[in-house]
Amino acid sequence: MNNWINDEYYRSIFDNSLDAIMLTRTDGRIFKVNHAACEMLQRTEAEICKLGRDGIVDTSDSRLTIALAERLREGRVRAELTFIRKDGSRFPVDVTSAIFKDDKGRRWTVLIARDITESKQMEAILRKAQEDATHFASHDFLTGILNRKTFIDRLQQEMNRAKREERVLSLLMLDIDYFKSINDRLGHDAGDAVLKAFARTVVRHLRPYDFCGRYGGDEFIACLPNTTNQQAFNVAERLRKRIESEYYTYEDNILHLTASIGISSYDWDSFIVPSSDLISQADQNMYKAKKRHNFVYGRYTESR
């Protein structure tokens, strides 16, 4: 080992490498490290050698055991591990390690490590950007609920599933009453605030497996899987009363809202219809509810 490290060529690589290099034994003892390793771990060479592998590597990281086993089996390994600085902070490191023998046949390991904190942070930023792009492509930018296209796609999938599993489902089409007067009186910022608050109210009082979308303007639409027409009417009536009982604030203004709700339902033993037909029926019933001032319309008993 001494002959190897004293060789001028290898000594130059060892001393000038920007990556951390450590000479160790397979049992985890550390005998020599370069300046880059000291900088990375915020310790002197003597401190690192005294600590050994268990003092600089997070031994609770399950990847360590896997990496050691692979190195023993293959003679070399590349892995991502968690290292520990002097201040106790943990950070991700890309490690390459190989076993070699010195001129006396003793087994040593050389370990080359690179701090990948920045690349991990960049990966997280890119992943978040991708997640945001996916979210914004499927959700309404103002209210945060599903946008029209995504809701329709998901509704068709739910209708197909209802057909396969011999289930029913229902739709609610909701429209905020006199919404235009809020925009005219208080401005569009107030209208936007009302739309966001209204969407939160609707989502909060639906079941976890229901899903809701913004259909356009002040119209919202909700799908109630495995829900009969009568059950949907009961849900709509409870939701209408909840909306009516809440107050919405914008700056110094307290707003009282009501909503008109139309219902349509799909039964698995009916003819297969496109989702647009089901939406159209709910939309028509919503306008009937608004025209009749009875707030909820669409029960089969009312349609006959």
Image: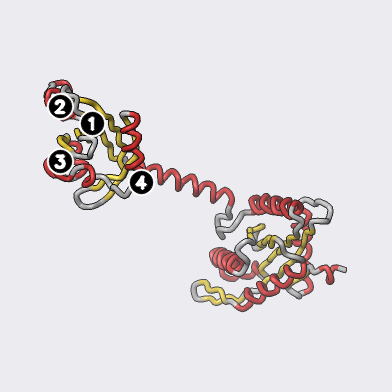
Where is residue 156? Give x, y as percent: 71, 51
Residue contact between numbered discs 1 and 4, judged by CB atoms under 8 Å: no
Question: Helix, strand, or loop for circle 2?
Answer: loop
| Kind of residue indicated by mark 1 | Val
- According to the picture, the residue beneath numbered tag 1 turns out to be 110
Task: Please tell me in which quadrant of the rendered image residue 30 appears.
Answer: top left
Question: Helix, strand, or loop for circle 3?
Answer: helix
Please tell me which residue is depicted at 18% across the width and 29% down the height of the picture.
Answer: 14
- According to the picture, the residue beneath numbered tag 3 turns out to be 49
Quarter of the image with the C terminus in it = bottom right
Question: Helix, strand, or loop for circle 4?
Answer: helix
- According to the picture, the residue beneath numbered tag 2 turns out to be 1
- According to the picture, the residue beneath numbered tag 4 turns out to be 62
Q: Badge 4, how many Cα within 10 Å: few under 14, some, many 20+?
A: few
Question: Helix, strand, or loop for circle 1?
Answer: strand
Label 3 or label 1, whichever comes before in sequence order:
3
